[in-house]
Image (cartoon, rainbow, N blue to C red):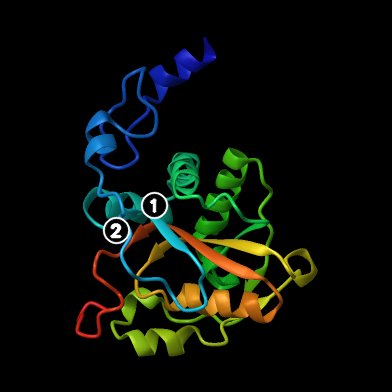
Amino acid sequence: MIDRLLRLLFPPKCVLCRDLLDDRQTDLCHHCRTNAPNYTKIKFKPSFVAHFTGVWYYKDDVRSSILRYKFANKRHYAPAYARMLAIKLQTEGFDNFDVLTWVPVSTLRRLRRGYDQVKLLAQALGQEINTTPVCTLKKIRNTPPQSGIPDASRRRANVLGAYRAVNAPEFAGKRVLLLDDILTTGATASECARVLLTAGASEVNLAVLAVASHDPSSKHNKNM
Ligand SMILES: [Zn+2]
C-alpha cells in the first residue's frame, strides 16, 4: 500500500533516460535495458590491476545519468547502479574477492558535493552482495579533476602520491575489489591499486560503472 502510494507520488523513472517506469520495470526502462551501451571487454587493464570490468561505456544517456548522480544530487541512483554492478561481477566471475573498497574523493570535494559518490556506490553494492565495504584509501592531496587533463602522462603525474593506504591490517594478504565510477585512462585506478599492493594487498581487481569508450591503451588516441 505504502509502496503503491510512493509510486503514485514519486513515479519511478529509468536511471538512464528518465522515462517513467511501469509496475513491472525496475531501475531501467525496457529500451535502456536492451540498448544501453554495455561494456565489452577489450585488451586493456590499468597497471597494477589483475582483472578489470565495467558495466557500460561512458556515453549518451549513461554519461548524463552519471553526471546527474555526481553533480545533481541523484544519490538514489546508487542502489540501481549497484544492482547492475552486482550482475556484472557475477557473470564475469568477479565474486572471488575478500575485501570491497572504493576510490575516495578528497575531503574538500566531498564537503563541496556533500557526498562521496563512489563510497555510496560501494555501500549500495555491499548491500546487494552482502559485504561491508572497507575504507582502505585516503586522498591526501586535492588534485585538479582528471577530466580537465587530456594527456595520459599528466593524468598519471596528477594522481601520483595523491592516495595513502589506511586500515592496512584489514586487507593485507587479501584480494581486494576496488570500485570506481568512471574509467578513462586508468591513471587514478592504477595509482590506487599500486598503493594497495604496496600496503600488502595480494591482488587488486577493479570494477567501474562506466568506461570512456576510446581504447586507453592506444598511444595515438587524442582523447586520452
Ligand atoms: Zn531508459
Q: Is residue 45 left or right of residue 192?
A: left
Cα gap from disc 2 to disc 1, whole angstroms = 17 Å
Write down the residue under mark 2: 58
| Residue 128, above or below 118 | above
**Residue 2 x %, y %:** 53, 14
Left or right, 163 with respect to 210, comes to right
Mark 1: secondary structure: loop
Q: Identify the mark at residue 37; answer none if there is no mark.
A: none
Q: Residues within 10 Å of mark 2 (few under 14, many from 20)?
A: many
Mark 1 neighbour class, 10 Å CA radius: few under 14, some 14 to 19, many 20 or more: few
Q: Position of residue 134 (x, y in %)?
A: 69, 58
Res. 62 in view:
yes
Mark 1 CB lies closer than 8 A to ligand 1: no
Secondary element under disc 2, as helix, strand or loop, is loop
Place of residue 102 in the rendered image (x, y in percent of width and height, measured from the top left): 57, 62
Residue 215 horizontal/vertical position (percent): 26, 71
Q: Quadrant of the C terminus?
A: bottom left
| Residue at the extreme right | 169
- Image height check: is 8 above or below 19? above
Is label 2 or label 1 in front?
Answer: 2
Residue at image position (29%, 65%) is: 212
**Residue at screen point 50% across, 63% down:** 206
Q: Is residue 197 above or below residue 39?
A: below
Q: Which mark is residue 72?
A: 1
